[in-house]
Image (cartoon, rainbow, N blue to C red):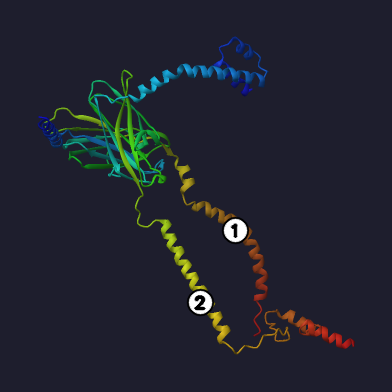
Amino acid sequence: MKIISVLLVLVASCLSGYMADDEGEPRLLASKNILNQYLVENKDLTVEYKIFNIGGSAAQNVRLEDAGFPEADFQLVAGNVQATWERIAPNTNVSHSVIVRPVSSGYYNFTAAEISYSAGADAKKRQVGYTSSPGEGGIVNFKEFNRRFSPHVVDWCVFAIMTLPSLGIPFLLWWSSKSKYDSKPKRS
Amino acid sequence: MIFESGASGKFVALGDDSMEGEIDGEDDDDEGVVETDDATGDDGEQAVTETEKPEKEEEEEVDTSLKPSQDVDATILFTKPVNTNDLPSGKPVRFLVGFKNNGEKDFTVSSLETSFRYPQDYSFFIQNFTTAVYNQLVEPNKEATFEYGFTPSEAFNSRPFGLSILLNYKDNDGNEYQSAVFNETINVVEPDEGLDGETFFLYLFLVAIVVLLGIGAQQLLTTFGKKHLGKGKAAPKVEMGTQKTDVDYSWLPQETLQEINKSPKGSPRGGSPRKRKSKRGSGEE
């Protein structure tokens, strides 16, 4: 009796597990990341979205939309802030990236993008979700960034010119006295 | 001034006696007053802790009994590395936590706590990682993803840990819930790098030592050989002084040379000073 019940439970659990695996709901996890280490005004900024389907079935008509880059603050360089995928199969992932350029410096709160998808072709209701949000990031002033990271070619040129007198005047003095001796032909 | 204001603040915080109120009135007294205040304060605190103890325990029990909500489905996915059993030390670990609201009420995801526990006893904390505060509202039938990353310390190499990831959230009514999205034993392993700087420079150092030894041996052999094989000793060189007169004056300008020739005495051309000295000596005798 006991054995039979245990067997039953086992079979049931196996079945349920199998069923869930076969036609579970799609489940999407979406991340949004900013790949740049320094966010600089008027310089490219790469944003990467990754969508993982960890559910048991494919997600249909997946739509990603990011309203977090308004035109007043960001200039779109490459890519699109809206993306759609017909189908994301279970246990797969897709990625999407956008390159934007911040117009002004200062702190900016990078918020979550929105994704929506339907469980199947016949599903009426669309599931809406949010990606992870990168959070607040400081956008560095272009001048400030250049002061710290540019090769400073102009600065070095100015430095060279400014050091020229202190090196050149002693050299000229030496040269004039040397040429006095050089003008005589050698005896040997 | 600042100290005084601080002290008076203390009085306000602890003082409920009329005595202390009087002391508070006199601003200029210092040490004695503070001491008495401390004494009374200690007494007061002790009394308070004694009475409050049972309350605190109750609170803790409530805290630990935070349960996940029935309407919430929380999942986890490790994105880096994919294999969750072995986490490389010193490398960032990232994971995504999915949160799905199946209920009718709004949920606010407040924070995510990650900690390393002692694997035999999960109530023993080894390391707490920074709590991520999200405070994101998730409406009914919506879902959200949260990303978190941490780096296991290199001091934790090749040891098992209980990794516990707890998601805290609350509903509209202020009820707090907690889901343990991950609560398993993991191993922190040493990342296998092909060639790290340490071993590279170790080998470089060994090669340098070998080369140095070779040069030393060669030096030793040559000197040894010279001593024992080269019997014909070269005559010892003796310093003869500056007797030679073939001095090259070609570098001097013409005027200077003429001047030298004109001058009757010129420079003393007697060779080495010692010889001159001996000549002079013989002349005197």
SS at mark 1 in the image: helix
Residue with the most extreme top position:
B18
- Relative to residue B123, is residue A19 drawn left or right? left
Q: Residue A44, image x and y in percent?
A: 36, 44
Query: Outermost residue, right direction?
Result: B285
Regarding residue B30, the answer to whether it shows in the image is: no
Number of the front mark, 1 or 2: 2
Callout 1 environment at 10 Å: few (<14), some (14 to 19), or many (20+)?
Answer: few
Label 1 in the same subunit as label 2: no
Q: Which chain is disc 1 placed on? A: A
Q: Image quadrant of residue B172?
A: top left
Counting from the top left corner in percent of width and height, residue A46 is at 33, 43
**Residue for badge 2:** B218
Residue visible at 53% across and 55% down?
Answer: A157
- Measured in 3D between alpha carbons, the distance from the residue under mark 1 to the one under mark 2, in whole angstroms, is 51 Å
Q: Under tag 2, what secondary structure?
A: helix
Label 1 belongs to which residue? Answer: A164
Residue A28: x percent and y percent? Answer: 23, 35
- Residue B20 vs residue B9, the one in the foreground: B20
